[in-house]
Amino acid sequence: MNAVAMSRTLLNLIADQVRPAFVQAAALCLRDGPTGPEVLLVRTLRLRQWVIPKGWPMKGKSLAQAAAIEAWEEAGVRGIVSDDPIGAFTYTKIKKSGLPVTCRAQVYRLDVLETADTYPEARKRHRQWFPVAQAADIVRDPEVQALLQKL
């Protein structure tokens, strides 16, 4: 582990003791594929890792509604979102300032009815449908892997 990673790890440990995790909303986007259920994953902007769409809460919107909006903005999909979360995961986000923050994303199932070619982040993000088992192998976060394995 290099010095920067060690510093971030130490900052995370201290921050976790001082403040609670920031809440986020995430969408687990599903559709019926030719060989069974498929999950839509998007690439993160900086590290290019496969994740499910997620983002910050929105004023005047429930977390489920915010998850559906994030799915549209990041992946160009719309559908029926569950009112209740199906799980959650915690991860560390590095802010533009370089400071790490702990985020706890509530995950809402979104059954996809529409996929668009033009959407807000189409030029920034790559999206791809994966069979559920393959998606569970691709994502790095163990809590997201567990959610996918339960499907």
Image: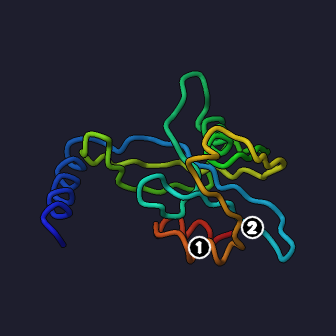
- Mark 1 and mark 2 lie on one chain; the one further toward the N terminus is 2
Question: Is 42 in front, or is 39?
Answer: 42
Instruction: Name the image quarter holding the C terminus.
Output: bottom right
Q: Residues within 10 Å of mark 1 (few under 14, many from 20)?
A: many
Residue in view at x 54 percent, y 43 percent:
25
Question: Residue 41 in the image: x percent, y percent?
Answer: 62, 60
Give the vertical position of 1 relative to 95 (above or below): below
Residue bearing the label numbered 2: 38
Residue in view at x 82 percent, y 73 percent:
36
Q: Tell me how the rendering is colored.
A: rainbow
Question: Residue 103 in the image: x percent, y percent?
Answer: 39, 47
Question: Residue 100 in the image: x percent, y percent?
Answer: 27, 48
Give the vertical position of 5 relative to 118 (above or below): below
Question: Residue 72 in the image: x percent, y percent?
Answer: 68, 42
Where residue 136 sits, quadrant-wise, is bottom right
Looking at the picture, which amino acid does disc 1 mark?
Ala
Residue in view at x 51 percent, y 42 percent:
55
Residue bearing the label numbered 1: 136
User: Under tag 2, what secondary structure?
Assistant: strand
Residue in view at x 36 percent, y 50 percent:
93
Question: Is 92 in front, or is 14?
Answer: 92
